[in-house]
Amino acid sequence: MKHRKEPPGDKNIIGARVVAIRKAKGMKQKEFLAKLQTAGLDISPTSLSRLEGQNRLVQDYEVVAIAKALEVSLRELLGEGTE
């Protein structure tokens, strides 16, 4: 996968956390997309890339599915208690 050339956007606060958690778990985007689908969220690779780059708004139900797919709490996904 290509490295991101543009700086992160400002459409969501979880994109960078999604990337960090996913990579810490050794999970590729393709594997993560499959886990999201299992959690009930079917998004395209482009949509995921835009989400991770913080260039896409994220719906509340998507945040829940993302946390479930990453096997983390909503608090951890939102970065609460990590400072």
Image (spheres, rainbow, N blue to C red):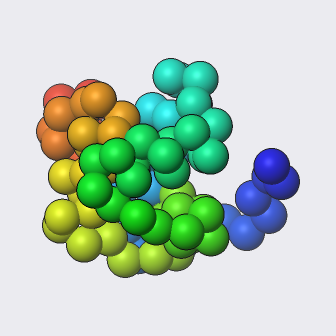
Quadrant housing the C terminus = top left
What is the tally of numbered marks visible in this picture?
A: 0
Residue 44 lies in quadrant: bottom right
Across and down, in percent, residue 63 comes to 25, 57
The structure residue drawn at horizontal position 73% and vertical position 69%, both measured from the top left corner, is 6
Across and down, in percent, residue 18 comes to 44, 45
Across and down, in percent, residue 54 comes to 49, 67
Q: Is residue 12 left or right of residue 34?
A: left
Q: Nearer the viewer, residue 18 or 9?
A: 18
Q: Is residue 2 left or right of residue 64?
A: right
The structure residue drawn at horizontal position 63% and vertical position 37%, both measured from the top left corner, is 28
Across and down, in percent, residue 66 comes to 32, 49
Residue 17 in sight: no
Q: Nearer the viewer, residue 31 or 9?
A: 31
Residue 74 in sight: yes
Farthest-out residue, front? 38
| 4 lies above or below 79 | below
Residue 49 lies in quadrant: bottom right
The structure residue drawn at horizontal position 39% and vertical position 53%, both measured from the top left corner, is 37
| 21 lies above or below 6 | above
Residue 26 lies in quadrant: top right
Q: Nearer the viewer, residue 68 or 6?
A: 68
Q: Nearer the viewer, residue 10 or 28?
A: 28
Q: Is residue 69 left or right of residue 47?
A: left
The structure residue drawn at horizontal position 25% and vertical position 72%, both measured from the top left corner, is 59
Farthest-out residue, right? 2
